[in-house]
Amino acid sequence: MVTTERQPPEPPPVSARAPEAQLVSAQTDAVARPGARVVVSRSYADFTPAMTFDIKKCDVHRLEEGPPLKAELTREQGLQYYRTMQTIRRMELKADQLYKQKIIRGFCHLYDGQEACAMGIEAAINPTDHLITAYRAHGYTYTRGVAVKEILAELTGRKGGVAKGKGGSMHMYAPHFYGGNGIVGAQVPLGAGIALACQYQGNNQLCVTLYGDGAANQGQLFESFNMAALWKLPCIFICENNKYGMGTSVERAAASTDYYKRGDYIPGLRVDGMDILCVREATKFAADHCRSGKGPIVMELQTYRYHGHSMSDPGVSYRTREEIQEVRSKSDPISLLKERMLSNNMASVEELKEIDVAIRKEVEEATQYATSDPEPPLDDLCNHIFANSPPLEVRGTNPWVKLKSTS
């Protein structure tokens, strides 16, 4: 089965690609002098076009075999994955800054550290497949095709936001993307319902239903598992296990931390969520399982968040700064991909730096938009209550205030 990868919004052009015919040139300053610096400019044809990498074996539950132990990465894929993950990282760091400046208010849950999960899943499913997640949703909003400026404008409550400034951090939507849901675990039954719609319509689509380790003990999850298994729904239930539910470690919150086995009668996979290739291959495996009519599958992605649970949580009262720094230095998903590409001649340091510069510029321009765009007028408050309906009167803050609602 051919899987087409959804392309996130086009970033600004990066002038990293040299013409094919360009010759390798070397110039020296003071060549005669021993130890002189040599500046080398390589052509695009010099890079390794594709490589196959060994990846970590997944733990399996009720499966005879798991995903492959090798994954191919092309240079184009590597650059796309790097660009997307780095954009999510910079966008989240900018959101942190805007929150501390009190430009973003209210709930704000950041995704930095977990970028390989969003990008790996997106690389393995089709744009027409469906995805629903919890409140840590900015990364998925971007991979599902929403521009950075629309995400940041939504965070600042502006008219140009993806939900017209009315949704905020936890309620962003796009075609085939159902949010952003604020109630812990509430998106899981909805995801099962979306999978039921896919089965009912016979369109060979599936639904990726995400939740965190903090939601994994919710009763509604097990009700959803039961129905999905009974009806063999094409649903990939994914637990993003970032080790802490709010300020409580998984060991203190769950009698069993084998979240991939929680489906009991549903097959499961435990995956290294910090390696984008592991996530991609496991999600491809899970998608094939669902599309072949075998019913749902549970995946546990072992990942880590660098920020606290939300912006109101410093994130260091229940874990040490040393723990966070160790994960950053040993398991960072962007650094892992970068190292793979550089050590196998799939990209140059200069090329990746140019991508970084372009992303910083894009995020800065998006910030300008998100801080200068007007807030929605009061007249818009009640609009879009229903998808299709004639204008209707809505009671305001008291019986004497009437607002007009249009779809």
Image (tube, helix red, strand yellow):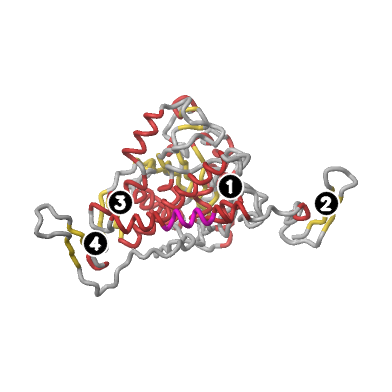
Label 4 sits on residue: 48
Q: Is residue 229 magenta?
A: no
In the rendering, which numbered label is found on residue 394? 2
Name the secondary structure under disc 1.
loop
Three-letter residue code for mark 3: Pro
Q: Earlier in the sequence, mark 1 or mark 4?
A: 4
Q: Nearer the viewer, residue 103 or 231?
A: 103
- Residue 313 position (above or below residue 73): above
Q: Position of residue 101 (x, y in %)?
A: 57, 40
Name the secondary structure under disc 4.
loop
Spatial CA span between label 3 and label 4: 22 Å
Label 1 sits on residue: 180
Spatial CA span between label 2 and label 4: 62 Å
Q: Residue furthest bottom?
A: 21
- Residue 189 position (above or below residue 143): above
Three-letter residue code for mark 2: Val
Query: Which residue range is magenta in the image?
Result: 358-366
Residue count near mark 3 (Cα–Cα under 10 Å), binned few <14, some 14–19, many ≥20: some
Q: Nearer the viewer, residue 285 or 29?
A: 29
Q: Is residue 361 magenta?
A: yes
**Numbered disc in front, either 3 or 4:** 4
**Numbered disc in front, either 1 or 4:** 4
**Numbered disc in front, either 2 or 3:** 2
Spatial CA span between label 1 and label 4: 39 Å
Label 3 sits on residue: 68
